[in-house]
Each structure stands twice: as C-alpha cells, then as structure tokens.
Image (spheres, rainbow, N blue to C red):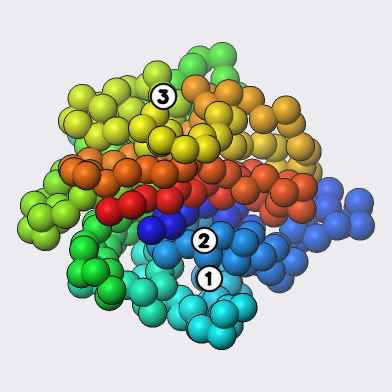
Amino acid sequence: MLLMSNNQWKCDKNAEWWINNGLDCSAEARVPLLVKAYKEVMPDILGLQEVSIRQAELMMQEMGRIELDDGTVAKYEYVSGGDTPIVYRRDKLKLLESGFFRYTEAIPGLEGKFNNSETKSYTWGVFECRECGKKIALMSTHLWWRSSNPQAASYQAFSDEAREYQIKQAMAKMEGVMAKYGCPGIIMGDFNAILDSLCLKAAFAAGWKEVHDISVGETDNTRGHHPCSPRGFSRDAGGEFRHAIDHILIKNEGDSVVECFKRLTPEYFDAVSDHYPLYIDLSL
C-alpha cells in the first residue's frame, strides 16, 4: 500500500517576486505540477497539508479519474478536512469512517495563540482494502509552526510545548480509532518538529515509530524541506533527516513491513512547494 504525505504550500495567487522574474506561483500554475508528482507514485492514500479550497478544486478535477496504462481506471476521492484533507483511491479502498478536528488557538497553561488562521488541524480516516479486507487508520496533520528558539526570526515562547500538546491530542484520537477497528495506525504530515523535539519524543514514548527508522528497503535521508515562498525559491543540498519536519509515524503495525521510505525531488517541484512529497510502501 502506497502512502504519501505532502504540504502543498497554501498559495492561490501569484506574488511580486515571481511576477518580476517571469514566474507564476498561483494555484493554477502549481497544482498541475503537484498532480504530476502524485501521478508518478499513484499513492493509495495521500495525506495533505496547506491545501486551499482552490487548490483542492483544481487537484480533484485532474485526479477524480485517471486512466492507467494497463487500461484500468484509478478513482480518487476527497475526504474534506480544512487545510489537512485526505485523498484516497476508492477503486482500491473503502472509507469506513472519517473525521476532522481543528486545534484550538489557546492551550491550557501556555501563554499565546497557537493556530494561525485556523490552518493547524488533523483529518483521519479508516480504510478497508477491497481486495483483502485488511484495515488501516490514517491521519493527516499540520502542527504549530513557530520556533521556541529566542534567536529564531519565527520565535514564539512555548511553541515546542504547543506542538507536544497537539500531537498528544492527535495520538489520543488515533488510539481510540485503532482500538475500535483493531487495526494499525499512521500519523503523517508537517509536524514542524525535528526528531529531537518534545513533540516527537512524546510520540516515541507513546509507542509510535518513525517509519524512516524501520524501513527495510530504500530509505531517503534528506531533510525534504527547501526555500519556496512568495519571496522566491531555491534548490539546496538536501540536508539531513535529523532536521526533517515532515514525518510518518506508525503504531500497532503487527506483521506489517515498511518496504521503503522515499521522497520525490524533481527540479520542477522546487517551484511548487517548500516540502517535497514523502511516501512509503507499506505491506500490511
């Protein structure tokens, strides 16, 4: 089962830097390239972040029905969920249940607001394989983005603690869903947190595993995040996985095997999003 996560960069309109350089970062320009990347992998489930209404509309116009080389048709369906929707192949999977939750701005015991423009949320779904009947619960999430480092330009006190609080909310929801259906669980998305963070430490302490660390096949070791914003874009050296902020976590995997952990990093994607698509092949 191919599972993919991608932060699309929520940007509908072209920006001044792009216009001045003869480029276009509007949804109309970028979404066809997002879809091009997704079609290279054809994921069974795609967890997304930073998806605008316009980007979703354009994406599903192209992904609702895809004719494959073998004559079959891939039919993708959209699970609505604010900025963190899920898209899945309904020709291969049956959606049994789903839900959406937007993280609150205020967090008990922490001074400040921790949800900018109501963009931080999670969407979850339980999927059953039409062929074998096996089930999997999957969540797409986007956590608070600012830094707890006073030296950082994006500094805001208690940001690390806010992400820890949010991931605990996400895990609690998934634990209930997994218990109800007796299936493994996946949490994927833009955590805005590196491995050595309160957020990931809380997840590991609760029994969740970073799939990068248990992949038995090809394993990408780059950061997966590069400059791409209204101020322009660039391609960097790739960085190290220990600085990655996009993650895929798994729990109760049983005999399941993570066959690979890969990223799509074509040059055309440098001007599409600051996050390269991350995907795994999971054998249930």
Tell me residue 230's x, y (percent): 73, 48
Q: Is any part of residue 19 visible from this angle?
A: yes
- Residue under label 3, please give it: 195
Number of other residues with Cα within 10 Å of mark 3, as a class: few under 14, some 14 to 19, many 20 or more: some
- Residue under label 2, please give it: 51
As displayed, is residue 64 above or below residue 189?
Answer: below
- Disc 3 residue type? Leu
Instruction: Give 60 or 198, whichever is nearer the viewer.
Output: 60
Check residue 56 in the rendering and tell me which mark sits there, or answer none. 1
Left or right of 167 in this view: 277: right
Disc 2/disc 1 C-alpha distance (Å): 6 Å
Name the residue located 78 percent from the left edge and 44 percent from the top edge: 232
Point out the tag, 2 or 1, that comes first from the N-terminus: 2
C-beta proximity under 8 Å, tags 2 and 1: yes
Disc 3/disc 1 C-alpha distance (Å): 30 Å
As displayed, is residue 70 above or below residue 190?
Answer: below
- Disc 2 residue type? Val
